[in-house]
Amino acid sequence: MKQKDVLIIGGGAAGFFAAINIAVQNPKLKITILEKAKEGLQKVKISGGGRCNVTHAEFIPQDLVLNYPRGEKELLGPFHQFMTGDTIAWFEERGVALKIEEDGRMFPESNTSQTIIDCFLNETKKHQIEVLYSQTVKSILKEEGLWNIKTQDEVFIAPKILVATGSSPKMWKVLETLNHSVIPPVPSLFTFNIKDDRIKDIPGVVAQNVEIQVVGTELFSEGPLLITHVGMSAPSILKLSAFGALQLAKLDYKFTIAVNFIKMDYQDCLATLKDLKLSLAKKTVLKAPQFDLPKRLWKQLVLASVIQDDNRWADLNKNQLEALAAQLTKAHFKVDGKSTFKDEFVTAGGIDLKEINFKTFESKLHANLYFAGEVINVDAITGGFNFQNAWTGAFIASQYISK
């Protein structure tokens, strides 16, 4: 039986960040991280295509919370205590400079996640934090004011523990034995599988600014849209999948989306097309893309409007103009299933937020049991927001654990 002052279950972003901050605030504490895999920080390694999307350049708490389909209300207070600016300063103090990209995502200047991993490993070494790998936690019990943690081959005891295991069904089962409620997990952040002749032969095409509505619901999103080999992706789709995670799961991922490729009202579009019929009369419709649409996408939408290869603008009749306006502003696509990023998998679900004190990230059911990261029912859209939730929760918990 090994006695520690603090045990952290989970060697990912939140676990390491908490451990380091606890050690900084109280160097006397003996801290151990238990990680089930052979190495830690695996999500950090692959995040952002191997560059690690550390956070997002959003510096107002009220705006930052809008990126969390689950956790928006609960994270407002915590973000006033520790948010983006604090994250940037924390890493810079340790020699890791971050840069802001055009879309607001923030990465290490080195452009490699290894920089973040090395920073964490150096800090754990410097503060003599013990990191034990291949330690699968089998049970958590409280006996005489101490937490008893059993792994497959060890027993650890400590007065305080923090759980930062991410989306781990096995750990959620263990936490249910402590009477914590777990909101059943469903996928968030996924792409849409769509078989449709209009997009079949144009993978790689990006429409820069579209609006998407899930037909028959209030679900709506806007932003870039990417045509893929299996359907559609990019921020507009991922945002829709995150905010619609629960609804789309109920629909068994079979639904219809209406895509407005040009962010224009149908009637306004039709009026514009009528003007083009006059001003571009002698030009071939297929060879004269409009509305800044990619040529290959324009071609498919034109053909879908029963306009022939050699039709000139002057040749278009009322029906063809109306069909083209519909394809541009309210094209319907049937979604049949989803594809998830297996490595960067995010779920909606986890420990019920009602059972957590967000001033401390401590369990409301058990004193000295803390949570950080995706183990709780918080998830975000893509862009560094899930990591910011991890840093914030881990930092705030560390302040109370270290006392």
Image: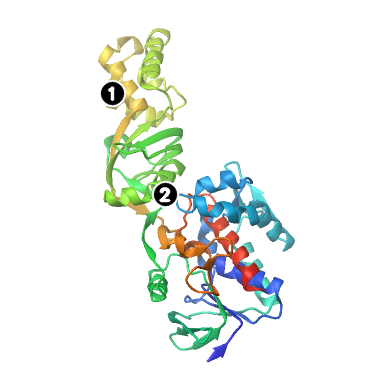
In the image: residue 133, left or right of residue 317: right
Q: Foreground: 397 or 153?
A: 397
Residue under the image location 31 percent in, 16 percent down:
321
Determine whether 200 is above or below 181 in the image. above
Mark 2 crowdedness (10 Å alpha carbons): few <14, some 14-19, many ≥20? many
Tag 1 or tag 2, which sits nearer the N-term? 2
In the image: residue 243, left or right of residue 383: left
Determine whether 393 is above or below 175 in the image. above
Q: Position of residue 15 (x, y in %)?
A: 56, 70
Can you identify the residue that label 2 sits on?
Answer: 242
Q: Quadrant of residue 319?
A: top left
Residue under the image location 56 percent in, 83 percent down:
158
Can you identify the residue that label 1 sits on?
Answer: 305
Q: CA distance from mark 2 to mark 1?
A: 32 Å
Residue type marked 1: Ser
Mark 1 crowdedness (10 Å alpha carbons): few <14, some 14-19, many ≥20? some
In the image: residue 133, left or right of residue 22: left
Asked if residue 52 shows in the view, the reply is: no
Residue type marked 2: Ala
